Amino acid sequence: MTSEENSRILLLGATGYTGGLVLAALLRRGARPVLAGRNAAALAALAGRHGGLDHVVVDATRPASLRQHLRRGDVLVTTVGPFERLGYPVAEAAAEAGAHYIDSTGEVGFVRAVRDRYDERARETGAVMLPAFGYDYVPGILAGTLAARQAGAAVRALDIGYFATGPLWRGISQGTRTTMRDGLTLPSPTWRGHRLVEERTASRVHTFSLGGRRKSAFLVSGTEVLFLPSDFPALADITVYNGWFPTLSRPLTLISSAVNTLTGLPGGHRLADALTFPLTLGPAGGPDATERARTRSYVVAVASTGAPGGAPLAEVHLEGPSAYSLTGELMAWAAESLVGRSKGAAGVVGPVEAFGLETLQAACAEMGLAAV
């Protein structure tokens, strides 16, 4: 039996909310992942509930602790965040071992740093590293790629908007609400004039047309700005927007401005926290299956020449399951696709480079993420 046939999927963070969704998706696909984490009792209990899965106790803050459980061709899947604080040792362990790597981060700064730090080593060891391989930001990259291809040689700009349907405030997790609040004080990388620049989050609002209705979204960032420029060198501008709460988009520009001003003043962080505290209010934990079924994800990509007031060259709309359900399915599919893989793209890559557009599009369609 070859080493590829012996390859395994290690799931770090299976006892958490997102990790549990990834585990459920893997099990539905017939995979038997090895559960990894620091809480031996919780791991044993979870493994027992699923027919006695293998499990190992690891310290995610120490690369050596993970390395001893990784072999070339394994897949290390991690949902343990915040990634800026906890993610680097995990990514390092995978790159050094030649194990493929998938994470659930939405932190674009972390993805930039992972590419800067580990891309070269991952290419040397043959590891495919897929950061942010979930709702953040596979749908936008897929929609952006399709729109840019349809637009052809004239394309110079992409505007990508993330939206949702249903009673979303109860359909997002406490962690997501906190991340959204904290993100107001962090800059958003955008692709502007053929280079990465940082802009204030929510400093701009863009309006998209969805089903005949105009909906607003505020400026954020996404890994679209990191991965799409290499696929489409003619793209001068790529901007990502969040339209989960369209009516709040313009008020959030004012809140963002106030928060960023306050954080630059003595004692301002405390006032900024008080100002943004309402954004974190909501039920604890994450939405259950019933709640997730009530919300759906929606992503739109508009390709244009970038000229003010110009008509779009192409427009792609994708609709799919809840952001959380989709993340679980995407990460499970990628893990199953990569396990034992020894050929193809290596390094820190985007979804299209890793799997090819047709394969990625077909897999997303099977998960329910498809053009509308």
Image (cartoon, rainbow, N blue to C red):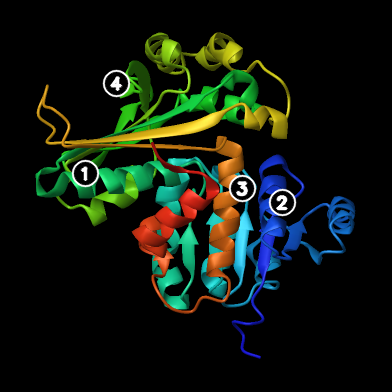
Q: Earlier in the sequence, mark 1 or mark 4?
A: 1
Residue 291 seen in this snapshot: yes
Residue at 80% of width from left, 64% of height from top? 55
Q: Which residue is mark 3?
A: 328
Give the mark toward the camera: 1 or 4: 4
Alpha carbon of mark 1 to alpha carbon of mark 3: how far? 32 Å
Identify which residue, 156 or 371, lies in the foreground.
371
Binning the other alpha carbons within 10 Å of mark 3 as few (below 14), some (14 to 19) or many (20 upward) gives many
Considering only vertical position in the picture, is 209 above or below 17?
above
Q: Quadrant of the C terminus?
A: top left
Alpha carbon of mark 1 to alpha carbon of mark 4: how far? 21 Å
Alpha carbon of mark 2 to alpha carbon of mark 4: how far? 37 Å
Q: Residue furthest toward the bottom?
A: 1
Q: Which residue is mark 2?
A: 24
Q: Amino acid at mark 2?
A: Ala
CB-based contact (under 8 Å), mark 2 and mark 3: yes
Binning the other alpha carbons within 10 Å of mark 4 as few (below 14), some (14 to 19) or many (20 upward) gives many
Q: Amino acid at mark 3?
A: Gly
Q: Earlier in the sequence, mark 4 or mark 3?
A: 4
Residue 254 horizontal/vertical position (percent): 38, 9
